[in-house]
């Protein structure tokens, strides 16, 4: 049914189509580009260790360092987005493995961190707009400290 000529034409056409599409397929990579505009900045970021506020939040500042000794009773984080319909997410890691991560209700809220290991740990907080746009990533680093009985606000 199929002649040799038709088979060769089909193979050549298939190869030409694959070569033509390769640059388009190679350019696609996952991104956080907006499909619908939305507010993706934090309005509030508070870190409290045993009732003591540890940072002064500035939306332009992306990194904060918190130093405290021992195992605190409570580490509370309040994170709220400027966009009422955006979602705040967080991830706590020890630098190698994630320890705790979650998303807060729409608009943000309050969450408590579980056990935070002594030494270095890193908390990332960010905002997602409804259209998929990602906002600025804020990092809070707990530094290794020598044992002392006082939490040190930054």
Image: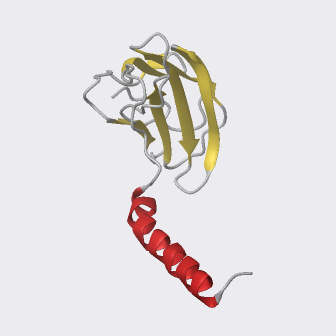
Outermost residue, bottom side: 4
Vertical position of residue 89 compared to residue 57: above or below: below
**Residue at 40% over, 24% down:** 54
**x, y percent for residue 106:** 56, 15
**138 or 8: nearer the eye?**
8
**x, y percent for residue 98:** 61, 47
**x, y percent for residue 85:** 49, 13
Give the position of the C terminus as an image quadrant: top left
Residue 123 seen in the figure? yes
**Residue at 60% over, 45% down:** 117
Give the position of the N terminus as an image quadrant: bottom right
Outermost residue, right side: 1
**92 or 76: nearer the eye?**
92
Vertical position of residue 100 compared to residue 18: above or below: above
Residue 150 seen in the figure? no
**x, y percent for residue 136:** 36, 33
Outermost residue, left side: 60
- Quadrant assignment, res 8: bottom right
**78 or 53: nearer the eye?**
78
């Amino acid at each position: 049914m199929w002649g040799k000529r038709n088979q060769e034409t089909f193979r050549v056409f298939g190869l030409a189509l694959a070569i033509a599409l390769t640059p388009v397929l190679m350019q696609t990579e996952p991104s956080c580009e907006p499909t619908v505009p939305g507010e993706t900045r934090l309005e509030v970021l508070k870190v409290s260790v045993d009732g003591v506020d540890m940072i002064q939040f500035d939306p332009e500042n992306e990194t904060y360092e918190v130093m405290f000794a021992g195992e605190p009773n409570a580490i509370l984080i309040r994170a709220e987005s400027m966009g009422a319909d955006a979602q705040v997410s967080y991830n706590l890691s020890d630098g190698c493995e994630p320890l705790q991560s979650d998303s807060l209700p729409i608009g943000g809220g309050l969450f408590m961190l579980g056990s935070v290991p002594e030494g270095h740990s890193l908390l990332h907080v960010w905002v997602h707009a409804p259209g998929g746009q990602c906002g600025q990533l804020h990092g809070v680093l707990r530094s290794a400290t020598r044992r002392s009985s006082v939490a040190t606000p930054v």
